[in-house]
């Protein structure tokens, strides 16, 4: 079965992720909302982003920041209404921006009516119930005896999509075509069928890899998504599905239009950005990062993952995010603002689709030492709250850190003149924000730099040098120590965006934290 090609806009897209809680608070209740996003669309349009992914904005007790849904078909009242979403979609569309929602297929909240019913009714098969205590399973909270399988936190019971393998002594393992698993597949289609007509462009799919249990090679999970994609191609051919999977070599053949490289799936992302500061986890393998001021990293792990995941024949895309709501911002720990610029020179000239996590365009900092907010803390060293602080529009009353009292995510902030804000950076032509805006515009106006242009890596050490479309040369030196690359023939190349680079007859000299994008003379 061959899928429809991905909508062509996706190939040129620059993505932007909004965590609705802390992006913009239009009504001053201390929590961001959809109307707040609508009010700030001009920023996104000016920046040049094409599509915005919103973290879950459905009814939820917010014990995992909205990834614990109680009604997939209702906007959480704290964010507004379906009409507010429609207004956002319409206002964004007028600016050429598409809106994507977050689909959470693998689990609900334990307060979802489906789960409340299942916990009282031993015949209900929408979740996975064992008759005895086995590892990971949690005691039933209802009249039904037994134990349910959670998918993430205990209060997120796994929806039953069946098991790829049966085991005689685990009779709760149902095949993927059993009634419960099929009802859950139908429910996914119903959810998509509800929101796509509102005008959203598609979904980021939470834990997309996790649906069918005990699934070697994710073969049955992949079949499930191929089925959903075939349905989508028939009924909503313009819609896109972006996977939270981190293995494009599996997710793209499974029908996703694109997949995010992820900090927990191999080291591709961490080998670029992770400086070992901010959130850490015992489950993350040790290693250095390439964007390291001491130049101790290597591009090899990233390049290997990208080469493995890169789809053949343009069928799907790999997304490279600056960060996300589960992971460190670029500006974490000792990384300074001047070190962020080379990151963006690379991000906007590499054939992956760039995804900017809100605030990273101004170099917002990861904030250590915050209390748990809405389930942010996963491990003692892994508190996601530090990457979820309010967008720093300006120093006004909405600016603040999420140390606010319970129920509020914003609080007024003591003035801190050193803190990056959108307002201050807009006014400064040399700011990171203005650089990111120019780089996005350059990517858009130069097809060779986009996802469809050819790429040839000329140097994998310091500086990293790559050629795009045979016409554009990119040099990044993210370390403090200068670096040289011998490449005669650059004289006469036109610098489109450069800092700290000089070109001589024998090659390129890149100073500390330098970057350059050159159009080669023909
Ligand atoms: C991945 C989401 O990105 C994360 O924020 C959430 O806690 C888990 N999935 C559970 O849904």
Image (cartoon, helix red, strand yellow):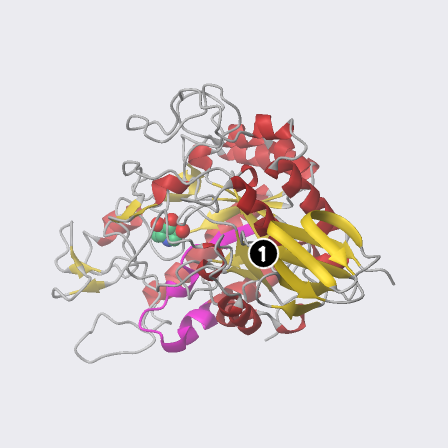
Nearest the camera: 500 or 166?
A: 500
Which residue corresponds to the image point at 33% horizontal and 46% vertical from the top-left?
A: 68
Q: Is residue 89 left or right of residue 370?
A: right
Examine the rendering and report whether any part of residue 65 can be seen: no
- The total of numbered circles placed on residues is 1
Residue at the farthest bottom position: 168
Nearest the camera: 185 or 200?
A: 200
Residue density around tag 1, few if under 14, some if 14–19, many if 20 or more, within 10 Å: many
Q: Is residue 221 magenta?
A: yes
Which residue corresponds to the image point at 60% horizontal and 39% vertical from the top-left?
A: 432
Q: Where is residue 181 in the image (x, y as percent from the top left)?
A: 35, 65
Examine the rendering and report whether any part of residue 223 can be seen: yes
Q: Position of residue 279 (x, y in %)?
A: 34, 49
Q: Is residue 93 above or below residue 258?
A: above
Quarter occupied by the N terminus = bottom right
Residue at the farthest right position: 522
Residue matched to label 1: 240
Which residue corresponds to the image point at 29% horizontal and 55% vertical from the top-left?
A: 152
Query: Element under label 1?
Result: strand
- Give the magenta-colored segment's residue range: 202-224
Q: Is residue 181 left or right of residue 188?
A: left
Q: Where is residue 274 in the image (x, y as percent from the top left)?
A: 43, 55
Q: Is residue 451 left or right of residue 27?
A: right
């Amino acid at each position: 079965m061959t899928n429809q090609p991905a909508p062509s806009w996706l190939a040129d897209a620059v993505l932007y992720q909004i965590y609705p809680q802390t992006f913009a608070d239009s009504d001053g209740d201390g929590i961001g909302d959809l109307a707040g996003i609508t009010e700030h669309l001009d920023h996104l349009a000016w920046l040049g982003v094409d599509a915005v992914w919103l973290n879950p904005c459905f009814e939820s007790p917010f014990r995992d920041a909205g990834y614990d849904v109680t009604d997939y078909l209702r906007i959480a009242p704290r964010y507004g209404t379906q009409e507010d979403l429609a207004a956002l979609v319409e206002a964004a569309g007028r600016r050429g921006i598409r809106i994507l929602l977050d689909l959470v297929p693998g689990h609900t909240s334990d307060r979802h009516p489906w789960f409340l019913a299942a916990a009282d009714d031993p015949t209900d098969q929408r979740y996975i119930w064992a008759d005895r205590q086995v590892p990971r399973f949690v005691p039933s909270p209802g009249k039904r005896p037994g134990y349910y399988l959670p998918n993430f936190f205990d209060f997120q019971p796994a929806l039953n999509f069946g098991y790829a393998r049966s085991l005689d002594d685990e009779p709760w393992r149902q095949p993927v075509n059993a009634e419960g698993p099929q009802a859950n597949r139908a429910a996914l289609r119903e959810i998509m069928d509800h929101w796509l007509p509102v005008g959203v462009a598609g979904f980021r799919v939470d834990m997309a890899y996790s649906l069918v249990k005990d699934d070697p090679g994710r073969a049955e999970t992949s079949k499930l998504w191929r089925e959903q994609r075939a349905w989508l191609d028939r009924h909503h051919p313009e819609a896109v599905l972006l996977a939270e999977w981190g293995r494009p070599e599996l997710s793209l053949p499974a029908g996703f239009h694109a997949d995010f490289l992820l900090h927990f799936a191999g080291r591709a992302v961490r080998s670029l950005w992770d400086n070992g500061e901010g959130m850490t986890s015992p489950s993350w393998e040790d290693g250095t990062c390439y964007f390291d001021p001491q130049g101790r990293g290597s591009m090899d792990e990233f390049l290997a993952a990208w080469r493995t995941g890169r789809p053949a024949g343009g069928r799907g895309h790999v997304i490279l995010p600056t960060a996300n709501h589960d992971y460190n911002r670029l500006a974490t720990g000792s990384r300074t603002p001047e070190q962020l610029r080379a990151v963006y020179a690379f991000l906007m000239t590499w054939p992956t689709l760039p995804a900017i996590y809100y605030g990273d365009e101004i170099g917002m900092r990861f904030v250590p030492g915050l209390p748990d907010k809405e389930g942010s803390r996963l491990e003692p060293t892994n508190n996601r709250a530090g990457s979820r602080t309010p967008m720093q529009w300006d120093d006004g009353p909405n600016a603040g850190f999420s140390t606010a009292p319970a129920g509020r995510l914003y609080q007024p902030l003591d003035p801190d003149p050193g803190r990056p804000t959108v307002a201050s950076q807009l006014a400064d032509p040399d700011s990171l924000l203005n650089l990111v805006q120019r780089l996005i515009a350059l990517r858009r106006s130069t097809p060779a730099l986009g996802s469809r242009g050819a790429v040839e890596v000329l140097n994998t050490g310091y500086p990293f040098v790559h050629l795009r479309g045979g016409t554009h040369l990119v040099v990044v030196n993210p370390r403090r120590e200068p670096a040289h690359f011998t490449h005669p023939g650059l004289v006469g190349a036109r610098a489109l965006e450069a800092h700290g680079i000089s070109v001589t007859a024998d090659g390129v000299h890149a100073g500390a934290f330098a970057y350059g994008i050159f159009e080669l003379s023909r």
